[in-house]
Amino acid sequence: MSMYQNYYAQPSYGSQTYAQPPVANGYHQFPPQASYPVDPTTFRRDFSNRLSELTMNSRPIIQSLSMYAHDYVRFAEIVAQCLETHIRRVPPWMKLPSFYLLDMISKNIFEPYARLFSTFVIPLFLETYQQVDEATRSKMVELVLTWRTGSPTGKELFGVPAQVQIERSIWGETSSSPASTSQSNGFITKSQVLSELEFTLGQKERAVQANPSDTTSQNHVHVLHQLRRLVEAGVSQEELKQILSQLRNLMRSSVTPTISQPSQVAPTSTSQWPSQSYTAPQTSLPPAATYPYAYPAIKTEDAVPSKPILPISSVPAVPAGGFANLLSSLVKSGILSNTGTPLGAGATAKDESSNSVDEEREASRTHRAFVLRHPVQLSTAGITKGRPPISEMLYDHLASQCKQCGLRFPDTVSGKKLLEDHLDMHFKQNMKANLNIGRGHSRSWYTSVDDWVHDTTDRKGKGRADGSRPLSGKAAAAADAAKRDAELRAQFVIVPPGDEAKPISCPICKEALKSEFLEDDEEWVWRNAIKKDERIYHATCHAEASTNTLASRLLNTGRSRSITPEAQVLAVKKSSPSPESLAGVKRKAGDDHSPLSQFEGTPPSKKLAISA
Amino acid sequence: MTAYGNLHMAFEQMRVRSLRKLHGSPAPEGEPDSGAEPPRVLILGPENSGKTTVCKILVNYAVRSGQGWAPMLVNVDPSEGGWAVPGALSTAAVSGPIPTSSPANPLGSAATSAPTTLASNALLPLAYWYGHEDTKRNYLLMDRLIRNLGLHISDRFENDPEGQTAGLIVDTPSSFASGPGATTEHRQKLIKACIDAFKINVILVVGHEKLNVEMQRTYGSRLTVVKIPKSGGVVELDRSYRERVHNYQIHNYFYGEVITPPPGIKSTTQGGETLTDLTLAPSSTAVNFSDLKIYRIGAETMAPSSALPIGAARVISEMQPVLIDPSQPGSGLLNAILAILAPFNTDERERYDEEILDLTVMGFAVITNLDIAHKKMTILSPTQGSLAGKTALVGSYEWQE
């Protein structure tokens, strides 16, 4: 206990912002609420009551409970007790959400909860792990893996021994007694390494799926596959250790925020990994990303708890042979450095976008200079003189080529960006093509004159067009409206647990709200929805209703109304509506944006149809 | 090819200068800043001289330069399908290289619902329906449609000053270059219409000395006239070949580019495009006669005004839309290609008599069957969707599968 006290007695973390799976919110920045005169007994009753509502994985409940715990830090012990009893009491299928709550509280508030929880989390977790089914187990394993870097300093959330013990128990060493575990000389089983490998591999593969052009991740996946083959074939303890520590580094660098400086990264990527030592000042928070944690360090840490971060020179030297190569290829491919992680890549992409305008200008300037260097007189005689530098322009200046369709791009930063976008496009279209198999395609109707005149998206200066060029009034209005619409549509309301299958419709347009699963938050949500006065509306409908008057709204052929008033009139007035005209109306419901159907509801065509 | 390469360099210089002027960058010393206009090129030439090929070469050079140019390509040759079917005049901004592999889609292909990867397979053209192969047949209509196209292009350029700097290239029919003496006046009027409508500043005459002299004399003082050599690889095409190409182009519009890979090859791509995605499925629907209003511009057969008796006027002028009753025998609608027009102006006050002449085409359809007894016709249209309430124009083109 005292050890943890020491271990976690760090300067305040309150101002630090960090994103943690599975939850990320900024509420720890809220000023702590003034403590109300609540006595412990009331609080205990209240908290237990609210805790008993947590019967399923509902983010709002977990969040509100976590907020509650945050507001009453002085009753932390009561919270811990309640939580422990709750988890022990509830049936196995209800335990996971409680662990999520535990996880959220410890990660976001940390002090003093993590310390308190750590007293019971090991037996509780292992007990639960025994009881639950396979699916929940894998979720729990994921949870444990996030605990490795869960503390605000990027270290083990509940301390090293707890982490080690839990992991060891999960990965097949249940026989070893808890007491001996932390003392053991760090024996690593193959299954543990393999399961960590799988976890890392899974994450990397997801990253690749999300961003197919991310060659770094692709590289990582490749190396990890090789590693797995090697481990499966059987390797020595020493090597297992090293693989494990590499893996953890990899995971840390992708999980933790980028705190480390490039200067720290540089030696890492050039030198052999085990020889590097961590040299951060002992008082400051360690940039965990570059801290190659290895099991042998546990002993040191236990022995000298006041100095948890030691240079891990105790790590044995690199074994020669294929492994070193493989691992150094890991290093070289940028696994160790933060810049190689998706996080770092995102940051550089942002920089690029801000520079891209300048780069584009620069590129066009170079091009201009080149073109103007070759004077050609535009006359019958002039164009037959001299050799035009066409091949330089079309081939030499455009060094990188798309392997799928052969388009060429300049070999500059912005050109690479273009090529990446182009490859993304290929990927998306290929995916669409695969999805569409079996359904025929057809020639589209041409665009209307108005659309054609304003269709300038595919043109030169796409990037510049956003800022510098004044759009025409109409186009600007349209762009503005589109932006607002997109914002509204991005709004969502989380489906209350249990209501997923319940049909619900917008009170304004009477259309059903479609629920969909949000991958990032792992929640069912209603898209384009807004909650007002306990009723769910379409965000767009609500915005329209609140800005427009009733009259103008009635006049307006609403975007999401299935049948416009005009179309209804059209259908009614015709004595015997032909199947075609009905099909037309139906089509409108399905696809509001097709140019054909847009005109269906307009008065002149209605007139025309009626008179015909 | 040297000449074409040098032409491209000259046009590229015009483009970069006009872009520099637009950005307000200072011109280097010794170079006049005035006259920095993007290239707006009219290509004239006799039959089988490679006019369309020159257009494609110049456009492809421009889009492949990696500068993001998307030059406007205008096709005013009604016997050339372009992005529509033969009989139409059309224009589109080309942002990706145009494949030159098939006469079915000589200038790239209009957008489909299929996921295509090549930008030139998803062009958004603006099309007008002329409806005849021969420009002499109704030159007044040609004149009007050319001016309409020009109007919309300048509207678009006004909206997009940067896009304008990529310039514009106009492909013309061979009848602009030469013809019987009696039609000289008409053809000069059409060339004049093009120059005015598209604000042409360069005329390229492909291998026709007489026309070059004529253009130099007429326009040499205010715009650049350049004679360029005829492409070496031009093959004389006979009439039956052109007819086959027309049929192929119409088939291509409805059914897409159907390419069967050689036996033994399972999946292939053409320029990164999955072949199955190039195959399209049109829809065939039966509609009532009353659902679709079909017009013909002018009478079906027209004697020239000069051949009429002195003092007699036409019963139907060249520009008058005539409503066709499909139930009448001899309406000539069976197998005729219809141009489905965009809807009329929604604002009643802005409607006018001959508005139908200024409506753009939404798509094309073919009447595959006429059931006069039941007052129904079967229409092959490119995609699903009702034609009710729509207006269509018919020309002299027919097509049978």
Image (spheres, coloured by chain):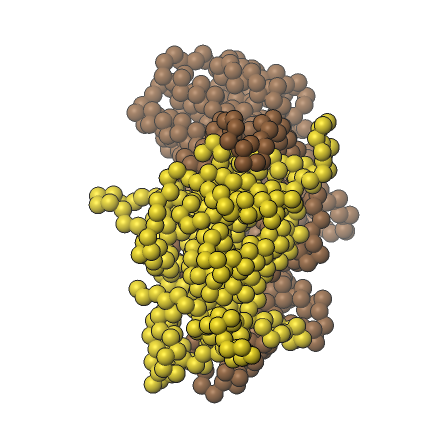
Chain colours: A brown, B yellow
Is A151 positioned to the left or the right of B172 in the image? right
Q: Relative to A249, is A524 above or below?
A: below
Q: Is residue B123 visible?
A: no
Quadrant location of the C terminus of chain B in the rendered image: bottom left
Residue B201 place in picture, x, y as percent: 61, 45
Q: Nearer the viewer, residue A456 or B197?
A: B197
Is A425 positioned to the left or the right of A530 in the image? left
The answer to which image quadrant residue B301 occupies is bottom left
**Residue at the spot 61% in from the left edge and 39% down from the top edge:** B15
Q: Nearer the viewer, residue A581 or A498?
A: A581
Q: Residue furthest bottom?
A: A575
**Residue at the spot 69% in from the left edge and 73% down from the top edge:** A552
Is A123 positioned to the left or the right of B222 in the image? left
Q: Nearer the viewer, residue A211 or B290?
A: B290
Residue B343 place in picture, x, y as percent: 55, 70
Residue B43 place in picture, x, y as percent: 51, 47
Quadrant location of the N terminus of chain B in the rendered image: top left
**Residue at the spot 63% in from the left edge and 63% down from the top edge:** A540
Q: Nearer the viewer, residue B266 or B398?
A: B398
Residue B223 place in picture, x, y as percent: 63, 44
**Residue at the spot 49% in from the left edge and 51% down from the top edge:** B177
Q: Relative to B277, is A379 above or below?
A: above
Q: Residue furthest left?
A: B263
